């Protein structure tokens, strides 16, 4: 797991503020960024994910936690079982987020806390990168993507209220991942999924994308410094 993933996991657990010994459920656990941070804080952690491979890897990496294969929209867990429920970048990838939020509410003890993180809109200084990707793959414009992301964040708040959560608060979290050169930034992104995405392009298109990427990164470095933003909106609420 990357230091970047560790950082957002730690941020979400800190925002949830569980007491030592709290029964914490992490939904959509993935490789365990949130679960590991919760174990380090002294929580009794149960982690679930819908991907068998993720469950297998996390169970091996984090024997201190109970790890299960489970659908977020149909948790095979008893009512009122957990003091804290977390979900890192969870709702954005689910086909039925309303059902999932209802399940988070169901398995939580009255007085318990839910804490979620969701992606932020694209930062203005990285719009060039979003627009570059849109030229090669089917993606919305920067303006449309920003509007869709803002609407998605508003929906998270409404989903929590509709499920019966109260005392909703939100906060922003961000940090930058700096790079010394456009080549370093290219290498980093190539190992984070860009390399796989380029495989669907013909060779001339791949070369053109890289050429334009390096040019855009050089211009960014000259104007603002070269860095990627890792950020999130954090949500916290309570079950009455």
Image: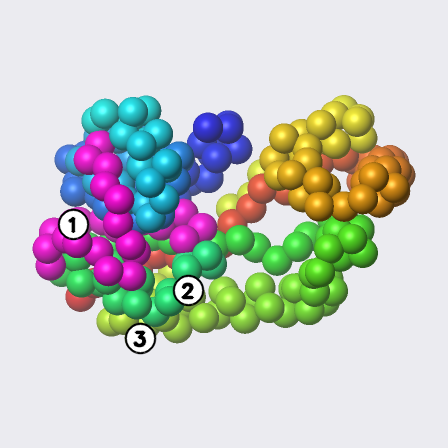
Q: Is residue 96 above or below residue 72?
A: below
Q: Position of residue 20 (x, y in %)?
A: 19, 34
Q: Residues within 10 Å of mark 2 (few under 14, many from 20)?
A: few
Q: Residue at x 29, y 54 (%)?
A: 71
Q: Is residue 163 above or below residue 69?
A: below
Highlighted range, magenta: 65-90
Can residue 167 be seen by looking at this rendering? no
Q: Quadrant of residue 226?
A: top right
The residue lying toward the viewer, choosing from 21 and 182, is 182
Q: Which mark is residue 95?
A: 2
The residue lying toward the viewer, choosing from 74 and 111, is 74
- Disc 1 marks which residue? 82
Q: Position of residue 24 (x, y in %)?
A: 22, 43
Whether 76 is among the magenta residues is: yes
* Left or right of residue 136, residue 13 in this image: left
Q: Position of residue 89 (x, y in %)?
A: 45, 50
Q: How is the image coloured?
A: rainbow
First in sequence: mark 2 or mark 1? Answer: 1
Q: Could you tell me how far apart the alpha carbons at marks 1 and 3 are, in whole angstroms? A: 20 Å
Q: Quadrant of residue 54?
A: top left
* Left or right of residue 35, residue 155 in this image: right
Q: Could you tell me how far apart the alpha carbons at marks 3 and 2 are, in whole angstroms? A: 17 Å
Whether 185 is among the magenta residues is: no
- Disc 3 marks which residue? 162
């Amino acid at each position: 797991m990357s230091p970047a993933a560790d950082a957002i996991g730690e941020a979400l657990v800190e925002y949830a503020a569980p007491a030592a010994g709290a029964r914490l459920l992490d939904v959509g656990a993935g490789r365990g960024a949130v679960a590991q941070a919760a174990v380090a804080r002294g929580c009794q952690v149960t982690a679930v994910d819908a991907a068998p491979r993720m469950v297998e890897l996390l169970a091996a990496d984090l024997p201190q936690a109970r790890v299960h294969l489970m659908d977020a929209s149909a948790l095979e867990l008893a009512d009122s079982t957990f003091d804290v429920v977390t979900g890192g970048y969870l709702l954005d990838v689910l086909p039925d987020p309303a059902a999932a939020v209802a399940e988070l509410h169901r398995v939580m003890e009255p007085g318990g806390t839910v804490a979620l993180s969701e992606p932020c809109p694209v930062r203005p200084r990285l719009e060039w990168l979003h627009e570059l990707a849109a030229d090669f793959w089917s993606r919305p414009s920067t303006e449309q993507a920003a509007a869709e992301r803002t609407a998605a964040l508003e929906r998270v708040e409404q989903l929590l209220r509709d499920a019966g959560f109260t005392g909703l608060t939100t906060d922003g979290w961000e940090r930058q991942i700096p790079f010394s050169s456009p080549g370093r930034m290219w290498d980093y992104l190539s190992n984070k999924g860009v390399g796989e995405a380029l495989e669907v392009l013909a060779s001339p298109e791949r070369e053109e994308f890289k050429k334009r990427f390096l040019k855009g990164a050089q211009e960014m470095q000259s104007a603002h410094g070269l860095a990627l933003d890792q950020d999130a909106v954090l949500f916290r609420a309570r079950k009455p």
